[in-house]
Image (spheres, grey):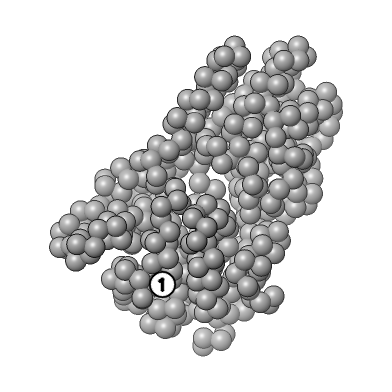
Amino acid sequence: MKIVHIVPGFGGTFYCGNCLRDSAIVASLRQAGHDTVILPVYLPLVMNGTVIPDGPPVFYGAVSIYIKQMFPALRRMPGWLHRLLNSGPVLRYAARKAGSTRAHGLEALTESMLLGEDGLQREDLAEIVNYLKYHEKPDIVHFSNALLLGMAGMIRREVGVPVVCSLQDEDVWIDAMEPAAREKLWDLLAQRAAGVDALIAVSDWFASEMKRKMQLPEGKVHSIPIGIDTTQYRFASPSLENPTIGYLSRLCEENGLGILVDAFILLKKDPRNSNLKLRLTGGHTGDDRSFILYQMKNLGKNGLADQVEIIPEFDFPNLANFFSGLTLLSVPVLKGEGFGLYQLEAMASGIPVVQPALGAFPEIIERSGGGVVYHPNDAVSLAAKIATLLAEPEKITALGLAARRGAEKYYDCKQVTEELLSVYRTVLPKWK
C-alpha cells in the first residue's frame, strides 16, 4: 500500500507530541512493509533535532502564506521571491520566532486554509495536488489533523484516492481564537469533515469532544491511540533515594509549567523533601522566554534555582538520560489535552505520571495503570498528590512496573499500526 501522510512541520525548537506521533506512525507503517511518505506543510521536518536531508519539499510555506494573507499587494509575488520565502533557512528562522505557534491573530489565515480552493492558498493547493498526482501516486492520503482539511476535497477529486484524517488538539488552536471566529471555524471543519472517508481520534475522550464540536456522525470516527516502539525505551525503576520530578513538553504557561513550579516550591517547604529536585526539558518558542524567566526568578526568590535543571536537548537519543533518575513525571496542562505523548514515553521508561483529571489523562492512566490523577488542577492539589506518593515509595515502584506493562500492552506501535491499517482497508475498497 502506498500511503502519504501530510503533516505540519515544526522546525524542531520544542517538543511537539503531534509531530513525534506522525513520525512514529510513518516509521511503523514502513516497518510493516508499506511504502509510506511524509509530506510537510508550513515548516521543515525535523527528526532527532536535525532537518531531514534531501527530504520532500515543504508545501504551504509558513512565511509565504502568512505574507500573502496579510499583504494583498504581495499575493502575486514573483516566483523567485516565493521560492526564497519557502527555503529551508527562512523557514527554520521563522520557527524560532515568537508567534510561530500562536493561534491568536491567525483567524483569517486559518479560515482561508479551510476554504481550500476558495481560499487564498489555491496555488499552494494546486502544487501539492500535482505533486501527489504525478510524483507520489498514493493509494491513500492521511492528514495529521483536521485543520488541514481544506486540501481534502481537491485531493480526493483530482488524485482519486480516499482521505483519512487524525484528530488531535484542534480545539487547542481554535478555542484560543477570537470568539467571533470560533463558531465559523468549527462550522467549516464540520463541512470539510463531511467529505473525508474516515476520522481517527487519539482517545475516546477526544472522539467524544470532536463529535460534539464538529457535528460528526457516530460511524465516521474511530478511536485509535498514539503508539510508540516500546523496545526503544530503556526501563529503569523510579529513583527513590534521590527523588526527582520530571517535565517533558514545551516550556510554556499552557502546558502547566507554572503550576508545577509552584507545586515544587510548596513541596520544598517540607523538610522531608529537602533532597527533591526538578528536571525540565522540551524546548520553547520566542513567546515563552519571558514566562520561563519569570518562573526561574520565582524559584530564585525561594532559594531553589540550584534545585532545578533545564535540559536543552530533548531529541530521542537524549530522552533516555532525561528519564534516568526520575521518580515521576508531571505535565499539568491547564485544560488537559487529547492525549499527551510524553505520558507514553515516561511509562515505557518505567516512570509513573501524575496528571490532572482533565481531557484524556484519566482515560490513559486508568487503562495503563501507570500513574495517578489529581483534581483540581492547581499547585496545592498537585503538591499534595506528589507528597502522598513520595511517602509511599513501594507504590511508586509498583506504578513504574505497571506503567511499563501498560505501555507494552496497550500502546505499542505494532498494535496501533494494525488498527490504523484496518481503517485504511475499510475505506480502500470503495475507491477500487
Residue 74 shows in this picture: yes
User: Foreground residue, 425 or 6?
Assistant: 6
Residue 21 shows in this picture: no
Q: Amino acid at mark 1?
A: Leu
State whether residue 227 is above or below residue 79.
above
State whether residue 402 is above or below residue 224.
above
- For label 1, the residue is 115
The image quadrant of residue 261 is top right
Percent from the top left, x then y, of residue 416? 65, 60
Within 10 angstroms of label 1, few (less than 14), some, or many (20 or more) residues? Answer: many
Name the residue at 76% across, 11% down.
271
From the viewer's perspective, tell me whether residue 376 is left or right of residue 97.
right
From the viewer's perspective, tell me whether residue 129 is left or right of residue 218.
left
Name the residue at 72% across, 21% down.
267
State whether residue 105 is above or below residue 318.
below
Name the residue at 76% across, 15% down.
270
Name the residue at 47% across, 25% down.
293
Secondary element at image label 1:
helix
The image quadrant of residue 128 is bottom left
Percent from the top left, x then y, of residue 307? 60, 16
Percent from the top left, x then y, of residue 292? 49, 29
User: Foreground residue, 96 or 77?
Assistant: 77
Percent from the top left, x then y, of residue 134? 31, 76
From the viewer's perspective, tell me whether residue 254 is left or right of residue 225.
left
From the viewer's perspective, tell me whether residue 3 is left or right of residue 325.
left
